[in-house]
Image (cartoon, rainbow, N blue to C red):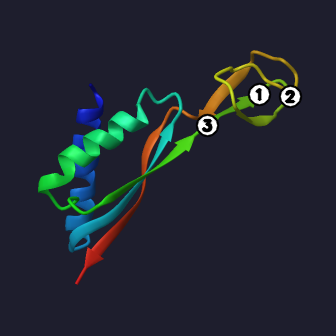
Amino acid sequence: MHEYSIVGALIAQCEQHALENRAYSIARVVIKIGVMSGVEPELLKTAFETFKLDGICKNAELEMQIQPLVIHCSDCDTRTQLEERNLICPECKSFNTRLTEGEEMLLMQLELETE
């Protein structure tokens, strides 16, 4: 399950930000997960709850924002958010599209507790 290694890297990134900002605890971690990122949100949440127990994230709440697919059509210059996993432009039916959002996993926000 690659979610374990992802959570390990996420917690390390959170710890680094906390250290840089002299925080003693992290209250909330907000991440954005694209629907085509290859990450299973529920497995990620379970892994986070397991791995956070010993460190600075032990009291942290994980908030996940699920990012739908967004494409840009080069033929009709339309940017569209898609409900389905389909890269065909809904406006002009072109295949000449580029995925602009929906594959990422990003740390969006940390709520740090400082003195």
Q: Nearer the viewer, mark 1 or mark 3?
A: 3
CA distance separating discs 2 and 1: 6 Å
How crowded pointer 3 is (Cα within 10 Å; few <14, some 14-19, many 20+) is rated as some
Query: From the viewer's perspective, is residue 108 above or below residue 73?
Result: below
SS at mark 1? strand
Residue under pointer 1: 73
Mark 3 or 2: in front is: 3
Q: Earlier in the sequence, mark 1 or mark 3?
A: 3
90 relative to 56 in the view: left or right: right
Residue 77 as seen in the image, left or right of residue 57: right
Q: Are marks 1 and 3 in contact (CB under 8 Å)?
A: no
**Callout 2: SS:** loop
- The crowding category of the residue bearing disc 2, from other C-alpha atoms within 10 Å (few below 14, some 14 to 19, many at least 20), is some
Q: Which residue is mark 3?
A: 68
Residue indicated by mark 2 = 76
Residue located 56% across and 34% down the image? 102
Q: Is residue 14 left or right of residue 73?
A: left
* Picture coordinates of residue 80, whole percent (x, y): 75, 35
Distance between the alpha carbons at the discs numbered 3 and 2 = 21 Å
The Cα–Cα distance between marks 1 and 3, rounded to whole angstroms, is: 16 Å
Question: Where is residue 74, by image quadrant?
Answer: top right
The type of residue carrying mark 3 is: Pro
Which of the 4 image quadrants contains residue 60? bottom left
Q: Earlier in the sequence, mark 3 or mark 2?
A: 3
- Of the residues shown, which amino acid type is indicated by label 2? Cys
Q: Are marks 2 and 1 in contact (CB under 8 Å)?
A: yes
